[in-house]
Image (cartoon, helix red, strand yellow):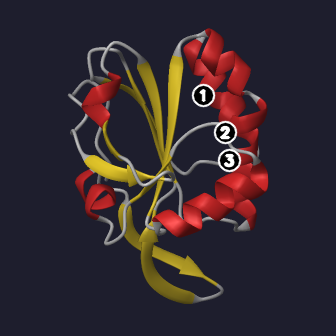
Amino acid sequence: MPISAGIPAPDFELRDDTNIARKLSEYRGRNVVLYFYPADDTPGCTKEACNFRDDYSAYEQAGIAILGVSPDAVESHVKFKKKFMLPFPLLADEGHRVCDLYQVWGPKKFLGKSYEGVLRTTFLIDGNGMIVKVFEQVRPAQHSAEVLAALA
């Protein structure tokens, strides 16, 4: 069961798509959409990222940072970000340490096969670093609109 609203968001440091180490705590003073997704350049993850991209100006106007996290390598994030012109950082969680920290790594099933992977989850974090909302079992196509509606 992922972390719930009302508690401080666990701080972490991961490399972004420019290979710069980013800490969640660097974003204090701003609201943050921290979204965990399974893999770069897959259909659902592409749809989710492109919807955040298409709505990016609304997030910017509201002063909200978007951070995408997956277990892919920095090099994969570079290609994914460039291919789809994503305007926000993608963080490389190789070894899924931060996914474990946020309790979004767990059992999944696809085509009858069981495996461990990222449980698509988004955390809305306020400027004080507190989790204010958790979105579980995210539907990629509608997710950005769902997050924006929660911010209104």
Q: Residue 112: horizontal and vertical position, in percent?
A: 60, 89
**Drawn side of residue 111 relative to residue 8, left or right:** right
Which of the labelled discs sits on residue 143, or is there none? 2
Asked which secondary structure carries label 3, the reply is helix
- Residue 140 visible to the viewer: no
Which of the labelled discs sits on residue 120, or is there none? none
- Residue position for label 1: 147
Residue count near mark 2 (Cα–Cα under 10 Å), binned few <14, some 14–19, many ≥20 = some
* Cα gap from disc 1 to disc 2, whole angstroms: 6 Å
* Cα gap from disc 2 to disc 3, whole angstroms: 10 Å
Q: Residue 103: horizontal and vertical position, in percent?
A: 29, 55
Q: Amino acid at mark 1?
A: Val
Asked which secondary structure carries label 2, the reply is helix
Asked which secondary structure carries label 1, the reply is helix
- Residue 78 visible to the viewer: yes
Q: Residue 64: horizontal and vertical position, in percent?
A: 52, 19
Residue located at (21% from left, 39% from top): 10
Q: Amino acid at mark 3?
A: Ala
**Drawn side of residue 89 relative to residue 21, left or right:** right
In the rendered image, the quadrant that contains the C terminus is top right
Marks 1 and 2 in Cβ contact (< 8 Å): yes
Of pointers 1 and 3, the one earlier in the residue sequence: 3
Residue located at (21% from left, 28% from top): 7
